Image (cartoon, rainbow, N blue to C red):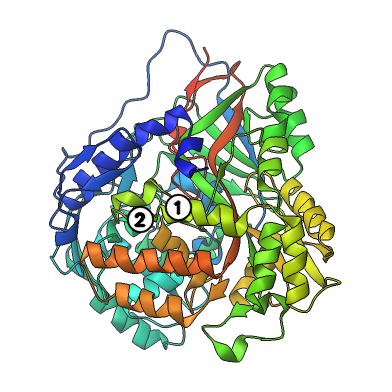
């Protein structure tokens, strides 16, 4: 069944979303159609210029109301996991969730439509070759610590320095190093010179990014959808690493107060914030990995918002909670074959069972995706065909990147067929199956860990012997970076557009390095050399073709991001869901009075 037919009615808001983004980012016009895609009319000419001017910021006054909210401290529980640190560069994008309320980005995102909008940048423009981006900064924005002064162009360059330094494990670090010409092995002096050349400070309120490769989508990497929250150079100069370890300091509508050893992070409202002043004084973000504990905390009113599994929706709604969904499909899930490092042959073990394409196809055919969607997600998941590629969302960048043949071929090549799966294993030399480590770790990806347990049983049904091992998310991050997942199968997820996912997951130097191959890397290299949208689209689509035909991964599903909210205390929560920080725009929460 084509993926388009699975979309919920609310996904039809995307034409407006995409139209707004294209108009803002590329200066072109778009025309919406009944199907949820938008094709930019001037896409093949490459980006022209964007200039979105806004008035100089004035303080957003603290709301005056007749009745006070029922609570003054909002508590949000999430799954947690990963590194508990205020050093942004030693965390992945998802783990940055608890610092996001304190941060702001050069480009923001409208929480209703998903359109990119000015935030710390007032306007931006790009040269026809898509290599030089001029960004004009908003004046008068101050950091939370008064002595740090005003946000300026020096802080932009400093933030890029932080996120690209040698010990960085930031999700997009390899992308940023590539764009700025850096490599991990650069000496501090060499890295500093490259950064100075790549991020030019024209004046205190003007930055010019000189990129090493064409990047018509660059605005996406300095936007709210990524993790480049602007941080203070003056703070680094005065206090260095020790100052940064204490807490995250930005310009956002909340100021981080404390990060505890148990991972609880507290924020306080910034009074008269230039953009939005929250209705409540305090925000607590609490990691609660155990789902039963989150549900109980919602019931006892200890927390006011928390994600829960879709098969528990009726239970929490029966207790008076309301399920709030993101405005857009956001997250995709996948099982990955560890060790398929064909792009770097010295790291690749050809004796791995799934080095054989037939084994990869057999393991895909073993998975009953429809049953998982029905029994775990109650029909609320949407089939993913090629990991990271979305049939509508990617259209704003690369019109026509989705290959309609993928829908048909997926059913043929990946559809549930345990009999054919056993046959393929036997042909590959594994008639009695084989044993392998099957890694389970806590992650905010919907369905975790229930999906892993079901898939493990699906593998057992065709004669495989998955050996379940539990790992901490931080330990998994280390294994990804060190490329030590050879011989393991693990669950994972992806966010962002197709090129983001390919760069992170499939590039030779990608931070996850899940499935690499010269056929993919050669096309990635070619993409960096052209600003022509049609050519970039063709190359990216060919990567998708290769991924599908070679069974590079075991793609699972796309999801809206949902959260359970207690309406006794919160009347409205609107968030877009296109950000790998999940629950954003908390400053706009409307409370019950």
Question: Is residue 555 something one can see in this rendering?
Answer: yes
Question: Is residue 588 something one can see in this rendering?
Answer: no
Measured in 3D between alpha carbons, the distance from the residue under mark 2 to the one under mark 1, in whole angstroms, is 10 Å
Q: Residues within 10 Å of mark 1 (few under 14, many from 20)?
A: many
The quadrant holding residue 124 is: bottom left
- Whether pointer 2 and pointer 1 mark residues with C-beta atoms closer than 8 Å, the reply is yes
Q: Indicate left or right for 484 with 535 as reference.
A: right
Q: Which residue is drawn at 29% across and 59% down?
A: 217
Q: Residue 46: give x, y in percent of width and height.
A: 17, 61
Q: Residue at x 71, y 33 (%)?
A: 311
Q: Indicate left or right for 178 with 254 as reference.
A: left
Q: Which of marks 2 and 1 is in front?
A: 1
Q: Residue at x 65, y 21 (%)?
A: 321
Q: Residue 16: give x, y in percent of width and height.
A: 29, 34
Given residues 240 and 326, the one toward you in this image is: 326
Q: Residue 298: give x, y in percent of width and height.
A: 70, 27
Q: What element carries label 2?
A: helix
Which residue bears the numbered disc 1?
249
Residue found at the far bottom of this picture: 346
Which residue bears the numbered disc 2?
148
Q: Indicate left or right for 532 with 297 as reference.
A: left
Vertical relation: 213 (above or below) 140 = below
């Amino acid at each position: 069944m084509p993926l388009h037919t699975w979309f919920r009615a609310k996904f039809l808001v995307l034409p407006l979303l995409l139209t707004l983004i294209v108009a803002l980012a590329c200066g072109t016009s778009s025309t919406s159609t009944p199907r949820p895609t938008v094709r930019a009319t001037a896409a093949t000419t490459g980006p022209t210029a964007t200039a979105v001017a806004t008035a100089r910021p004035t303080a957003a006054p603290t709301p005056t109301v007749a009745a006070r909210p029922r609570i003054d401290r909002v508590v949000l529980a999430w799954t947690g996991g990963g590194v508990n640190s205020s050093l942004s560069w030693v965390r992945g994008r998802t783990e940055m969730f608890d610092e996001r309320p304190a941060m702001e980005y050069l480009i923001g995102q409208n929480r209703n439509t998903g359109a990119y909008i000015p935030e710390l940048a007032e306007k931006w423009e790009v040269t026809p070759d898509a290599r030089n981006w001029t960004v004009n900064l908003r004046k008068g924005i101050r950091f939370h610590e008064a002595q740090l002064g005003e946000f300026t162009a020096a802080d932009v360059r400093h933030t890029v320095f932080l996120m690209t330094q040698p010990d960085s494990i930031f999700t997009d670090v390899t992308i940023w190093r590539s764009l700025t010409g850096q490599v991990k092995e650069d000496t501090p002096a060499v890295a500093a010179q490259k950064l100075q050349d790549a991020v030019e400070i024209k004046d205190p309120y003007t930055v010019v990014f000189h990129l090493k490769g064409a990047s018509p989508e660059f605005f996406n990497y300095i936007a709210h959808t990524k993790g480049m929250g602007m941080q203070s150079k003056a703070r680094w100069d005065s206090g260095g690493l020790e100052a940064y370890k204490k807490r995250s300091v930005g310009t956002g509508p909340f100021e981080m107060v404390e990060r505890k050893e148990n991972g609880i992070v507290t924020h306080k409202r910034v009074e008269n914030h230039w953009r939005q002043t929250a209705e409540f004084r305090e925000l607590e973000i609490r990691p609660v990995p155990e789902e039963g504990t989150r549900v109980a905390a919602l019931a006892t009113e200890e927390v006011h918002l928390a994600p829960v599994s879709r098969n528990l929706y009726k239970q929490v709604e029966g207790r008076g909670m309301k399920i709030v969904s993101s405005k857009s499909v956001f997250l995709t899930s996948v099982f990955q074959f560890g060790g398929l490092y064909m792009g770097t042959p010295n790291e690749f073990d050809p004796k791995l069972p799934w080095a054989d394409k037939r084994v990869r196809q057999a393991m895909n055919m073993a998975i009953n995706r429809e049953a998982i969607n029905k029994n775990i997600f109650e029909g609320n998941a949407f089939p993913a065909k090629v990991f990271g590629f979305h049939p509508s969302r990617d259209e704003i960048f690369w019109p026509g990147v989705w290959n309609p043949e993928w829908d048909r071929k997926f059913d043929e090549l990946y559809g549930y067929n345990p009999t054919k799966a056993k046959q393929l294993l036997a042909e590959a030399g594994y008639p009695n199956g084989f044993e392998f480590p099957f890694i389970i770790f806590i992650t905010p990806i919907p369905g975790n860990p229930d999906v892993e347990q079901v898939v493990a049983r699906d593998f057992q049904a065709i004669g495989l012997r998955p050996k379940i091992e539990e790992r901490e998310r931080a330990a998994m991050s280390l294994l990804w970076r060190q490329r030590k997942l050879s011989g393991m199968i693990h669950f994972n997820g992806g966010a962002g557009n197709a090129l983001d996912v390919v760069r992170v997951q499939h590039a030779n130097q990608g931070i996850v390095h899940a499935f690499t191959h010269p056929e993919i890397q050669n096309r990635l290299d070619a993409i960096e050399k052209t600003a022509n949208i049609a050519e970039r689209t063709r190359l990216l689509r060919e990567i998708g073709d290769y991924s599908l035909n070679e069974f590079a991964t075991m793609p699972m599903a796309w999801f809206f991001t949902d959260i359970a909210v207690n309406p006794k205390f919160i009347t409205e929560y609107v968030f877009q869901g296109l950000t790998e920080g999940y629950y954003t725009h908390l400053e706009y929460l409307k409370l019950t009075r």
